Image: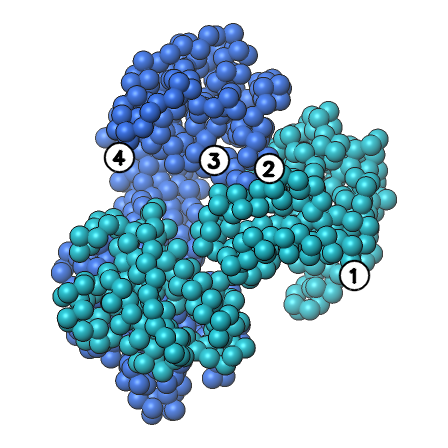
Chain colours: A blue, B cyan
């Protein structure tokens, strides 16, 4: 099965938005073993969309459209596809009910053009839109499948993942269900992780293993196809055990979790709190932690101690430490962590001091970082030598802090 | 002139990266008055790229390729285009010198395949790559222009903006130079801004005015075409004065500046410092400020006071204020700003307290925010009622803080 993705929307051709849907669908299709040979972006124009369909039919047997399913006159994807396939558009009553309910719920008047959103290609399999109004649909003719999805990523992505994807598995014919699980790793590079599981990667077939490195983390997405959900889950579990044996010490979470959400979760379970004292990271750790719903239960506050003066006067790091070892030192990181924990009456604390760049500090190279971690019973500091941009160094430093804390929580 | 953008790279079809180059080029071309009717993404495959070129030639007279100019066997854009146009590839000596110098500079051995990067289509106009090795080029045949640009956005964007763009202006024929300036606004919505300058937008022709709303800010990009640089600059200046008269109070900077870089810049000029005490924003203001190079000259540190206890014990907000007005109040914001300024011995300070959501706080609605601003002589608090997500509310709150501080600095 070969796919072509056609994104419809003049806003894409004007550069107002980027075709992130193309990337998302490509990744998903790769996982299903469906090759994608072309993406096409075309404007809200009947003639040009029709021409794009004719070209796509010559080179793909699955054509996925995103966009152009809305209520306005500009939205013409299903009109053009229906016309092209010589099928009429018909009102899909459950979709119309869904749209009418929506307007009732938000107490707005439903203008007539919204009925247009409930039109579907006659005989198509319809996907309800759980995050918007326009339904998606798939229709097949002459061995070519036409899958129409809404344009807004917040509607398109869940519709594809939760509804269309399994249908494509079925269309491919061999299996009928699909199950995915994302394993999240930190503290190990993509190359090293791939080396550790090379034999598993080499022999992968079902489940597939898709590694992805992003923002200093590595994920492995495991996807199994089978004929029952439990069979698919068993396949994943077995593979996960194999992976865990090799690189389990770097695994910190699953699916949508983050280092920070795990930290908030683990501390909440224990009814404990954390604080932080940040120098080079300038508040990034706290900003990340407090972006998690429920952070207030585990975090009362913290400090950014950028200058040495503030490290002394407010955080109480001794002049001797700064004089003898400097601010970028194990001793300073330990003192910062200890004092912050005491100052904020918290159970745990983390401190960050180092050289984010662009220039050296205290004769220490850019990327030299100390992360202090204080638990109810111990305090220690970890040394990091990071490379990359100022923002990259700050970002990875805070992630290491969260990771070390998580490891301490897992011990305790 | 109609353009088609062809992005070449299998990594795009596997979903490993998104075609952000397509968006960037579309926006740039719109500004030049060049219509874009299609984007195509194709893999590193000779046959399929050749097919895409043949299709594009039927519907565009400017074909812009991104990607596939590198040293590996997968990189085949210029090979396919040269072959298609029946021109040979020839070594471009300045490009080869540039590549050899690069390897000498980083003290690495230049493998032979890097010579391939210095090959250009015979007779093409070559663009030096200031941020990488592979040069770009433009070649015309039978009234169709073929523009080849590198794939990495960090190389492609400056090459297009600084080199290829003006050449396209010349190709269009009417003018020979181009000048752009971005005006950055905060505190005014896109709709209101567009209303205030509606007559200017309606009659725009040269310079063009391109509004863009992003991350709670609005920018206007003014682009003038003329026959001399000074003539273009004059056109921009005149329009800018008109715009300034209407909405000058919301203008905070130009081109690549940000609210935070402006703040660091203005404080540096005055040799003054700022601190912050953050509740709902959880360190975001400090994190943004310290992401600017040179922030350490104007910022010694600050506090995140998430819980009421920490607001009292560490920041010294009185129990009475919290009891009588609550943490989300004008009084608390003022007290936080005043006390932080004193604690950190800074000239200015800003405080943030409010309800980021997802739930109410102290009976106050999500989006209720107070921003305190303290100068060497005064302290006041601003009330905001923001809508949107938790992250959106936090993000705009900190930007308002930076904006209010900037306004105070402009007064002083």
Q: Please give the chain letter of the residue carrying mark 2.
A: A
In the image, which is nearer the foreground, mark 3 or mark 1? Answer: 3
| Image location of residue A190, percent across then percent down | 44, 53
Q: Which residue is mark 1?
A: B97
**Both labels 2 and 4 in a single chain:** yes
In the image, which is nearer the foreground, mark 4 or mark 3? Answer: 3
CB under 8 Å between discs 4 and 1 = no
Q: Please give the chain letter of the residue carrying mark 1.
A: B
Sequence-first disc among 2 and 4: 2
In the image, which is nearer the foreground, mark 2 or mark 1? Answer: 2
Q: Which residue is mark 3?
A: A21
Q: Is residue B178 left or right of residue B406?
A: right
CB under 8 Å between discs 3 and 1 = no
Separation (CA) of disc 4 from disc 3: 28 Å
Q: Is residue B286 left or right of residue A254?
A: right
Please tell me which residue is depicted at 82% across the width and 40% down the height of the picture: B173
B17 or B293, which lies in front?
A: B293
> Which element carries disc 1, helix, strand or loop?
helix
Separation (CA) of disc 3 from disc 1: 41 Å
Please tell me which residue is depicted at 52% across the width and 7% down the height of the picture: A86
Q: Which residue is mark 4?
A: A233
């Amino acid at each position: 099965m070969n796919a072509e993705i056609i994104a419809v929307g003049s806003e894409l051709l004007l550069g107002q938005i980027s075709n992130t849907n193309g990337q998302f669908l490509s990744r998903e299709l790769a996982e299903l073993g469906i090759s994608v040979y072309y993406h096409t972006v075309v404007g809200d124009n009947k003639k040009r969309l029709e021409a794009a369909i004719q070209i796509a039919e010559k080179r793909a047997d699955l054509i996925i459209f995103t966009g152009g399913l809305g209520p306005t006159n500009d939205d013409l994807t299903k009109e053009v596809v229906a016309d092209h396939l010589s099928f009429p558009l018909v009102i899909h009553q459950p979709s119309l009910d869904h749209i009418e309910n929506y307007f009732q719920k938000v107490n707005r008047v439903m203008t007539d053009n919204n009925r247009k959103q409930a039109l579907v290609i006659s005989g198509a399999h319809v996907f309800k839109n759980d995050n918007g109004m326009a339904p998606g649909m798939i229709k097949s003719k002459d061995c070519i499948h036409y899958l129409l999805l809404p344009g807004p990523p917040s509607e398109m992505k869940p519709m594809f993942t939760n509804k269309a994807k399994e249908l494509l598995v079925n269309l491919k014919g061999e299996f009928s269900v699909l199950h995915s699980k994302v394993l999240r790793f930190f503290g190990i590079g993509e190359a090293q992780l791939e080396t550790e599981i090379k034999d598993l990667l080499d022999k992968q077939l079902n489940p597939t293993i898709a590694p992805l490195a992003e923002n200093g983390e590595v994920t492995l997405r495991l996807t199994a196809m089978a004929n029952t959900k439990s069979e698919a889950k068993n396949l994943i579990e077995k593979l996960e055990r194999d992976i865990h044996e090799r690189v389990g010490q770097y695994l910190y979470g699953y699916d949508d979790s983050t280092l920070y959400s795990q930290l908030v979760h683990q501390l909440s379970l224990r009814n404990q709190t954390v604080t932080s004292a940040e120098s080079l990271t300038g508040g990034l750790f706290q900003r990340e932690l407090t972006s998690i719903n429920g952070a207030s239960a585990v975090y009362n506050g913290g400090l950014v101690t950028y200058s040495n003066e503030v490290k002394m006067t407010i955080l109480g790091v001794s002049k001797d430490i700064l004089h003898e070892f400097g601010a970028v030192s194990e001793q300073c990181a330990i003192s910062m962590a200890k004092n912050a924990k005491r100052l904020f009456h918290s159970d745990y604390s983390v401190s960050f001091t180092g050289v984010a760049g662009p220039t050296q500090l205290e004769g220490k190279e850019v990327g030299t970082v100390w992360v202090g971690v204080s638990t109810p019973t111990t305090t220690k500091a970890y040394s990091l030598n990071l490379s990359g941009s100022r923002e990259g160094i700050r970002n990875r430093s805070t992630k290491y802090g969260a990771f070390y804390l998580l490891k301490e929580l897992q011990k305790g």
